[in-house]
Every structure is written in structure tokens, then in C-alpha cells.
Image (cartoon, rainbow, N blue to C red):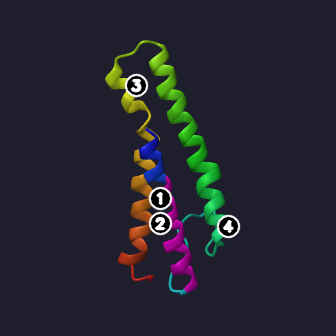
Amino acid sequence: MWAAHIVYAGAIVFDAEVTHAGLANHRCAEGNVDLGTDPSRKDLYMENFLTEFAPETLLDWLGAFAARGTHTPRWFWKQAGYVGATGGTIAHLHGGIEWFTHGCM
């Protein structure tokens, strides 16, 4: 579970850095309406880590812990810790790659 969340954190860093570089070129605007069209690097990291990564990691851990404590099948609680990390990794890799495919870099 922790390895998946490390990959998730790496995807957030990739997305934030590519976004910041694309914004520095003034070729494109940020697509996340919560951040506005020209967020700072600090805004990108604060939004992604505090409002997304931390709660999802906590929920994944609690879900896996709770499932393990209720004697659910091992295959279920082993996978419960990957739910948020998998979705978040896919979303941030997709977001970062879009900066390249739309010619923003």
C-alpha cells in the first residue's frame, strides 16, 4: 500500500512541475477551476497534497485497517489500500501528460 502511495505522490509532483513549467511559458492555463488560471507552485502543491493526497491516504489506510480488523478475506483488505492511490495516480499522470500533448511545453 505504501509503495502505491509513493508512486501517487510522484505523480502529483510530476503534474505540479509540468503544470508550473507550462504556466511559465504562458502558452496554456490551469484546467483546475479551484486553482484559477495561473496558480503558483505553492498553490499547486498545497491543493494536491493537503486536500487530496493526505485525506485519500488516510482513507485508504483506514479502509485497509478496518477491513483487516473485521476478518474480511485477505484479498479484499490487501486491495482496499490501493483504491485512492490508483485513481489519483492515473488522474495526475493524465493531467501532466496533457500539458505535453496539447503543446503547452
Q: Secondary structure at mark 3?
A: helix
- The answer to the question of whether label 2 and label 1 lie on touching residues, with beta carbons closer than 8 A, is yes
The image position of residue 66, as x and y in percent, is 51, 21
Q: Amino acid at mark 3?
A: Trp
**Which of the numbered marks, if any, corresponds to residue 77?**
3
Q: Specify few, some or many for label 1: CA neighbours under 10 Å numbering under 14, 14-19, or 20 or more.
A: some
49 left or right, relative to 71: right
Compared with residue 65, is residue 17 higher up or lower down, i.e. above or below? below
**Which of the numbered marks, if any, corresponds to residue 14?**
2
Q: Nearer the viewer, mark 1 or mark 4?
A: 1
Q: Specify few, some or many for label 2: CA neighbours under 10 Å numbering under 14, 14-19, or 20 or more.
A: some
Q: In this view of the protein, which residue sits in the foreground, 22 or 8?
A: 8
Q: Quadrant of residue 32?
A: bottom right
User: Which residue is tagged 1?
Assistant: 10
Number of labels in the image equals 4
The magenta segment: 9-24
The image position of residue 72, as x and y in percent, is 39, 15
Tell me which residue sits at (63%, 76%) in the image: 38
Q: Which residue is situated farthest in the front direction here?
A: 3
